[in-house]
Each structure stands twice: as structure tokens, then as C-alpha cells.
Image (spheres, helix red, strand yellow):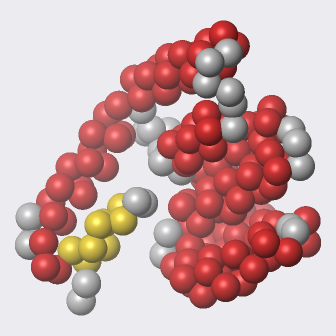
């Protein structure tokens, strides 16, 4: 393990062990993505189903199930975490969102933002929780610092090609052909 997201490494190793073929294991990752999305739709209320069918599926389903599997799986888990919060359990939402961070480190920002915006800001426990989250994030960064710096270097190399050919995204940088 060289700093990669442990949840995705575990999923990949497990699927390769089951199917004995990396191509089939990658396709199975896409099936996991669509399974998580189906769980979200089945558990969802009318607004969540509309959001998923009108926006999320048409815009993200292809790329999230093929090209950016880690991000897609993390995004599905974040959707499930928001459902847990909507159903009244902030703690369950946090623990549901945690595997998303293990699949893609950038999910830490989403999970943190969702949790912080659902807490009353002026309560002592809320402030303490935000400080704890900040400390845990700093420790997490230190644990995977070399990996993250290497990734930032790869993205920086892509941006040198000119702003007109690069589309920045919250999940990375994609070059337009």
C-alpha cells in the first residue's frame, strides 16, 4: 500500500480474487456502483429520486462507472450518507459516509461539509466535533502526504497544457481531446 485509498484497494483485491481477471474485476466495480445507486433510489424519497434520475445519472453515471470508479463509488456512498441524515441520524450519516473517504480521499471534504452544516454552530459539542474533524483530517493528510503530493504533481503537469484545453473539476482535471 503506497497511500492509495484503502477501501478501493480492498475492493479491487477482493474482486480480482473472486473473478481471477482484472477486466472482469473492473466491470464488477461498475456493478457495485450501480448497486449502490439502486439502493439510493429504492430508499429515496421523491426529491432524491428526481435528483438522481434527472441530474446524477445522465451527467455522471457513465464516467463514474467507467473512468473514475473511485470517485463514483465514493459519490454513491455520500448520497447514502445524506439519506441517513435526512432520516434523522447524523451519526449514522457520518458512519455511512466514512467508507466513501476510504474509496476516494476527496470525499472527506463532502462528508465534513455535510456533517458540519447539519450541526448547530454555537454549541460546545459542535465546536469540539469540528476541531476533532480538523485534527483527524490533519493526521490523515500526514499519513498519505507523499501520495497526495504525487497526485498534485500529476494534475499540475496536465494544467501546463493551457487553460483552454483543460476543464477543472471538483474531482480532478480532465483533458479535452
Residue 156 lies in what quarter of the image? Answer: bottom left
> Percent from the top left, x then y, of residue 21?
65, 73
Residue in the foreground of this view, choosing between 154 and 13: 154
Question: At 36% from the left edge and 65% from the top edge, which residue is drawn?
Answer: 169
Residue 72 lies in what quarter of the image? Answer: bottom right
> Percent from the top left, x then y, of residue 52?
71, 76
Residue in the foreground of this view, choosing between 6 and 14: 6
> Percent from the top left, x then y, of residue 174?
31, 73
Is residue 56 in view from this perspective?
yes
Q: Is residue 126 above or below residue 24?
A: above
> Percent from the top left, x then y, of residue 109?
51, 43
Q: How many numbered marks are there?
A: 0
- Horizontal placement of 3 versus 41: left or right? left
- In which quadrant of the rendered image does the C terminus lie? bottom left
- Horizontal placement of 32 versus 173: left or right? right
Q: In this view, does 2 lie above or below 55?
A: above
Residue in the foreground of this view, choosing between 13 and 38: 38
Residue 2 lies in what quarter of the image? Answer: top left
Q: In this view, does 70 lie above or below 147?
A: below
Question: At 15% from the left edge and 60% from the top edge, which residue is drawn?
Answer: 157
Question: At 75% from the left edge and 80% from the top edge, which residue is drawn?
Answer: 50
Is residue 28 in view from this perspective?
no
Amino acid at each position: 500500500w503506497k497511500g492509495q485509498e484503502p477501501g478501493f484497494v480492498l475492493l479491487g483485491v477482493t474482486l480480482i480474487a473472486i473473478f481471477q481477471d482484472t477486466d472482469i474485476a473492473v466491470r464488477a466495480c461498475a456493478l457495485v456502483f450501480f448497486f449502490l445507486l439502486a439502493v439510493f433510489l429504492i430508499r429515496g424519497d421523491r426529491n432524491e429520486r428526481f435528483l438522481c434520475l434527472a441530474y446524477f445519472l445522465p451527467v455522471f453515471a457513465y464516467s463514474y462507472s467507467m473512468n473514475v470508479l473511485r470517485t463514483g463509488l465514493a459519490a454513491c456512498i455520500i448520497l447514502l450518507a445524506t439519506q441517513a441524515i435526512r432520516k434523522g441520524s447524523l451519526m449514522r450519516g457520518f458512519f455511512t459516509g466514512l467508507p466513501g473517504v476510504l474509496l476516494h480521499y476527496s470525499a472527506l471534504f463532502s462528508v465534513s461539509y455535510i456533517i458540519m452544516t447539519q450541526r448547530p454552530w454555537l454549541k460546545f459539542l459542535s465546536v469540539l466535533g469540528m476541531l476533532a474533524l480538523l485534527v483527524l483530517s490533519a493526521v490523515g493528510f500526514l499519513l498519505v502526504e507523499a501520495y497526495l503530493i504525487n497526485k498534485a504533481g500529476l494534475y499540475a503537469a496536465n494544467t501546463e497544457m493551457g487553460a483552454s484545453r483543460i476543464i477543472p473539476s471538483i474531482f480532478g482535471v480532465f483533458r479535452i481531446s
